[in-house]
Image: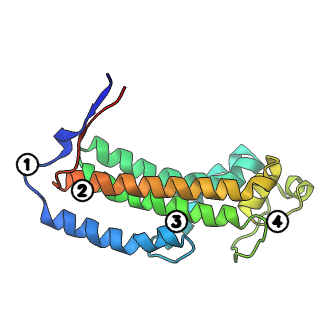
Amino acid sequence: MPTLDLTALRPAAPKPLELGFLGLATLYLIPTLLSPGRATVLDGVIFYTHEAGHVLFSPFGTFLTIAGGTITQLLVPVAFVTYFVRQGQPFSAAIVLYWLARSLGHASVYAGDALTLDLPLSGSWESGAEEMAEHGETRHDWRNMLEMLGLLNATYVVSGALRLAGTLVFALGLYAGLLTGGVPVPARFTWR
């Protein structure tokens, strides 16, 4: 029977400062689970990592230039989670999972707008404009990606999947924060 034992991550005594911070972060971000379009202080960071991703992926063709924004806004928090885990700072990794959850929520709103094109957008496309014109040129990343993949009719499925993923990552971050903050939550799991 496979067993996952996370008891080593629980400190000997509760850490009130960490748990207080986790509580504040949780209360602050829960409304974004219910309404992912709601603005948060993380949105500026998400926006700039998204825009930097377009530049970062620009050498790899039109599709990856477009997708690079979302890829980067998701990979940056994953990189920080990985860093904190490797540094033996699981509580910090748990908090950064909230950033990843918010980034997924942000991407779900953007993907969900691919049909209506109601969101205000920034920037302009110069690279790959010819290929984009074949797909009904627009500055909307998700509209372009879903059209190029032939999945425009699946817009709401993609958006819902991103939102669900964000909610699950948020729950994982909360669990990990409680565990590494010293709350006696279950830490040993066995399944058949």
Distance from disc 4 to disc 1, alpha carbons, whole Å, reads 55 Å
Above or below for 60 versus 33 = above
**Which residue, given by chain and number where applicable, does mark 3 sit on?**
46
In this view of the protein, can residue 55 be seen by the observer?
no
Q: Which of disc 1 and disc 4 is earlier in sequence?
A: 1
Q: Amino acid at mark 3?
A: Ile
**Which residue, given by chain and number where applicable, does mark 4 sit on?**
138
Q: Which of disc 4 and disc 3 is earlier in sequence?
A: 3
Q: Amino acid at mark 4?
A: Thr
Quadrant, the N terminus? top left
Quadrant, the C terminus? top left
Q: Amino acid at mark 1?
A: Ala
Residue at (39, 56) in percent of width and height: 171
Q: Amino acid at mark 2?
A: Leu
Number of numbered discs present?
Answer: 4
Please, what secondary structure does the residue beneath circle 3 have? helix
**Which residue, given by chain and number where applicable, does mark 2 sit on?**
178
**Which residue, given by chain and number where applicable, does mark 1 sit on?**
12
Between marks 4 and 2 in the image, the one whose residue lies nearer the viewer: 2
Residue at (24, 68) in percent of width and height: 21
Looking at the image, residue 67 sits to the left or right of residue 17; the answer is right
Q: Residue furthest left?
A: 13
Residue 34: assigned label: none
Between marks 2 and 3 in the image, the one whose residue lies nearer the viewer: 2
Please, what secondary structure does the residue beneath circle 4 have? loop
Q: Which of disc 3 and disc 1 is earlier in sequence?
A: 1
